[in-house]
Amino acid sequence: MAPSTAQQWTVEGKEGFESLKFNNSAPIPKLGEHEVLVNFHYASLNYRDLIIPKGQYPFGVKDSVVPGSDGAGTVEAVGSAVTRFKKGDKVLTIFNQGHLAGSITPDAVATGVGGMIDGTLRQYGAYDQQGLVAMPESLDFKQASSLTCAGVTAWNSLFGLPSSALKPGDTLLTQGTGGVSIFGLQFAKAAGARVIATTSSDEKAQILKKLGADHVINYKTDENWGETAKKLSYGGLGVNHIIEVGGPKTMKQSLSAIKTDGVITIIGFLGGMTKDQPGFLEVLMRGCVVRGALVGSRAQFEDMNRCIDANGIKPVIDEKVFGLAELKEAYQYMWDQKHFGKLTVRID
């Protein structure tokens, strides 16, 4: 039986990580008839979590929100009308609670967990039964907590446009060693594709090769890594897919690497903003598709989970694990880019 109070974090203001406030005795949410009470065991962090308390997130955030979109836990209790889950089931949150299948809608964009809906950086959370998925059977709670945002975003990037979905023999270009890029590498290799990865160090390059990357380019020493990637692609014609995490500052290189009819999926702006960025004419000249991906749907999440179980894919988790009370330290660790893969928070 759940206690009457529990630990949780909230975002109080936009002054940076000091806006994160810890409550040791927050009330346990009361269940509606269609809701599920989840006892969280692990959460994982995303760049989005870091910029919300800095006031830099471009989507909606409610006052005093519980942060965190990614959480893995056990069903503690269910409402009277719940049919999808039962007590004891292992579940994961979906990022946009209203995005169940198909294209995302404006209404669904306003249902982001850790933004407009209270998130996972707490011991207990209540969610509509439609906003959860069953955990992959082959993963533990720590591994599975990494899937909600980064995993689904990578899956959507590669397979979200059915007419241009990644195929065996295609070439994917990834950027860096963050969660989305590494998931993209793993899913692409499972699909029989080739992967060209970029990174900033020889040490990280060796890890990427162990994960299956066919080629690794150091973008610190090769400023024209886009052209290099194109030369490494099949026939030197360009890569079929790019997961664009850098945004405006790396888009020029991505356009240099892409093949005619290739797909560049923009999923973030880790490189920051700049006025000196490519425009629509460059896209026209390349004859490519440029799209944005706002994570993905519950249906895509479930497809991805089946792939993970079928192929024995194990998420890459940073060796450093923080406790729930150490959340500010975890945010700073990730902000300083000390992590490799997904950074997790243990919730006791």
Image (cartoon, rainbow, N blue to C red):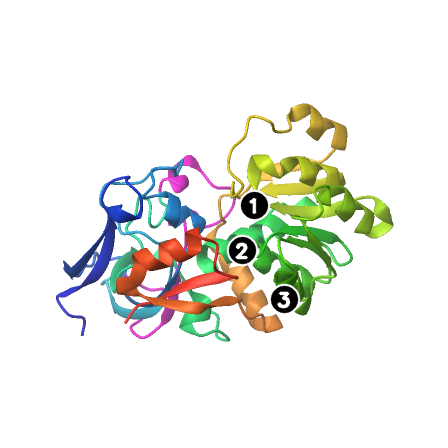
Q: Secondary structure at mark 3?
A: helix
Q: Is residue 294 above or below residue 218?
A: above
- Mark whose residue sits in front, 2 or 3: 3
Q: Earlier in the sequence, mark 1 or mark 3?
A: 3
Q: Camera-side residue: 218 or 156?
A: 218
| In this rendering, the label closer to the viewer, 1 or 3 | 3
**Which quadrant of the rendered structure holds the C terminus?**
bottom left
> Is residue 11 toward the left or the right of residue 300 in the image?
left
Q: Earlier in the sequence, mark 2 or mark 3?
A: 2
Residue 61 place in picture, x, y as percent: 31, 40
Which residue is most to the right?
235
Q: Is residue 279 something that shows in the picture?
A: yes
The kind of residue on which mark 3 rests is: Ile
Q: Which residues are magenta?
A: 81-110
Give the labeled residue for mark 3.
Answer: 207
The numbered disc on residue 245 is 1
What amino acid type should be assigned to the residue bearing mark 2?
Answer: Gly
Specify which label sits upstream in the sequence, 1 or 2.
2
User: Which image quadrant for residue 70?
Assistant: bottom left
Image spot of residue 149 (x, y percent):
46, 54
Mark 1: amino acid: Val
Pointer 1 with pointer 2, Cβ within 8 A: yes
Residue at 41% across, 57% down: 333
Query: Dot 2 corresponds to which residue?
Result: 178
